[in-house]
Image: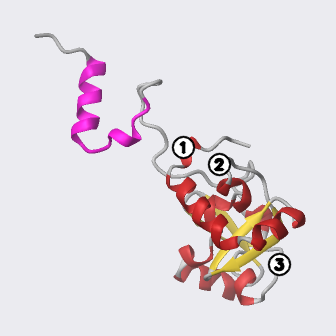
Amino acid sequence: MSVNRRTMLALSIILSGQALLFDPVSAQAPQSKPPSNIDASGIAIKGYDPVAYQALGKPTKGDAAITASFEGATYRFATVAHKATFEAAPATYVPQYGGYCAYAVANGYTAAIDPTAWKVVGGKLYLNYNASVAKSWAANATGYIKSGDANWIDWRKLKKG
């Protein structure tokens, strides 16, 4: 019995328990981690300090000379202390849904963000497209978070905005 290379690849992926990561259209395994909303230079949150949202209670521009990287994104910080805080627990400060608009992800697509359209809920940072969208999102944050979390688990199905 002759087995071709594509069949062997498919079998090895299924047997390794990674069948859900397999893309049968291209016969390649896609990105294994969700995308981050970063600019062409790899900067997240349009250069805003992720720690400032919780530490200062407001969006604050980061300094290009004070940076740290996490999961392929580079974050800027207003102070060295914020950078140290971030490096001690980055998952506590990175925005949810890879930094994409929380309202959009809750509704099945991705969209850009305005770093000044934000809310911290349950110690997690959520960003939105603009102030109007942020207001709508905040009116039902619990519901949008539930939908957003469910959609983000299966982020490959989100329509790219």
Q: Is residue 95 left or right of residue 131?
A: left
**Magenta highlight range:** 5-23
**Whole-percent x, y for residue 43 in the image:** 72, 59
Q: Is residue 38 above or below residue 14?
A: below
Q: Is residue 116 visible?
A: no
Q: Secondary structure at mark 3?
A: loop
Nearest the camera: 56 or 100? 100
Q: Residues within 10 Å of mark 1 (few under 14, many from 20)?
A: some
Q: What residue is at 44 percent from the left and 32 percent from the top? A: 23
Nearest the camera: 154 or 75? 154
| Quadrant position of residue 147 | bottom right
Mark pair 2, 1: CA separation = 10 Å
- The quarter in which the N terminus is drawn is top left
Q: What residue is at 70 percent from the left and 49 percent from the top? A: 110
Q: Is residue 68 left or right of residue 134?
A: left
Q: Earlier in the sequence, mark 3 or mark 1?
A: 3
Q: Residues within 10 Å of mark 3 (few under 14, many from 20)?
A: some
Labelled disc at residue 52: none
- In the image, which is nearer the foreground, mark 3 or mark 1? 1
For disc 2, the marked residue is: 108
For disc 1, the marked residue is: 156
Q: Secondary structure at mark 1?
A: helix
For disc 3, the marked residue is: 60
